[in-house]
Amino acid sequence: MPVLASKFERHPSIWYPDGNIVLVSESCMFRVHKSILQSHSPEFRKMVEIPPKSIGVDYFDGCPMIHVYDSVSDLTLFLETIYNQSPNPPFHEDNSVSLTYIATCLRMGTKYESSRVMQEALRILRLECPSSYRSLKALQYRETPLIQEIGKPGEKYITILNLARRHKLKLLTPWCIYMCIQLPVETLIRGIVGPDGQREKLSDEDLILCIQGKQELIRACMEVAERFRCDGIVCHEDHCQREMERWENRRVFSELKDDFFRPDPLGFRDVLFPMDHYKFCRACRTNIDSIRQHQQESIFLHLPSTLGIW
């Protein structure tokens, strides 16, 4: 049956004159193409298979109307992604996207079984959560496209970890746990306030992983420090020996205290051995850098088992 246009509003950008189906969310209409929906979503493929002039189906300008129960913003994001016309499309590494965008992509991609939408979210999350030592080093020298809308730096990993658990994104969890360990204990326990104003917390299981994992990372920091102390100096000159003693005193006493409360053996804060603070000869400096890389690569490789994830 025909529907009066006055009952609904057309979406300002997702309205194709040659579209052959109209999606309705709340009071907003989206005129799109069946073929696009069918190619990107098995769920929509079933929904749009409507026999011509079916009884009980509303029509607008000759196009069948399908009512969905998604918000206008969620459906807009979904359609923009499959049509690749987002006003801020995260298709290049220099584009910024929000956690809200990622969460919506995962939710809508799961609901409509759209690999295209899911993969867009995963592409951004993989940039944020390295799965290899090479990608870890790259992360240290560039900005990631994922921005944190609210809260302090690093708190976004609470949200990312919860998304990874909810959508069974197992490969993201080791780095998320590692970065959550870097957060203050109060933040881990109380959680954070998300962009929607709701408080978000880790599950009890992940909180336990963070507490236990912190002890393992402290142990890893101690092992790296011991390697520096025992094997770092290769020239045996008095000057380099004195510099190592100066570092040893700093490590033993106060300056590294914060590092052992927030253990970061992979060196994101470079507290364990900030090379710019010490004047070693070239040979010793090269050797210390080699030890650091070898130790960090080993720590990263074994991170899942070290943190008790798998």
Image (cartoon, rainbow, N blue to C red):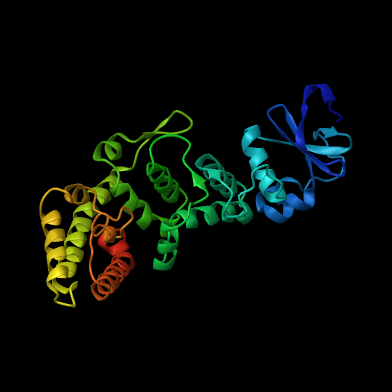
Location of residue 249 (image quadrant)? bottom left
State whether residue 239 is above or below residue 154: below
Q: Residue at x 21, y 62 (%)?
A: 220
Q: Is residue 48 left or right of residue 121?
A: right
Q: Residue at x 53, y 49 (%)?
A: 145
Locate residue 201, reporting x and y percent.
35, 38
Q: In this view, does 10 lie to the left or right of 225?
A: right
Number of numbered discs overlaid on the protein picture: 0
Locate residue 176, reporting x and y percent.
37, 52
State whether residue 10 is above or below residue 140: above
State whether residue 281 is above or below residue 109: below
Which quadrant is home to the N terminus?
top right
Locate residue 262, reporting x and y percent.
24, 49
Q: Looking at the image, which is closer to me, 128 or 21?
A: 128
Location of residue 54 (image quadrant)? top right
Q: Can residue 47 be seen in this view?
A: yes
Location of residue 273 (image quadrant)? bottom left
Check the image and name the residue furthest to the top. Answer: 6
Q: Is residue 69 visible?
A: no
Locate residue 216, reporting x and y percent.
20, 58
Which quadrant is home to the C terminus?
bottom left
Q: Looking at the image, which is closer to me, 29 or 279?
A: 279
Q: Residue at x 13, y 48 (%)?
A: 254
Q: Looking at the image, which is closer to me, 30 or 2?
A: 30
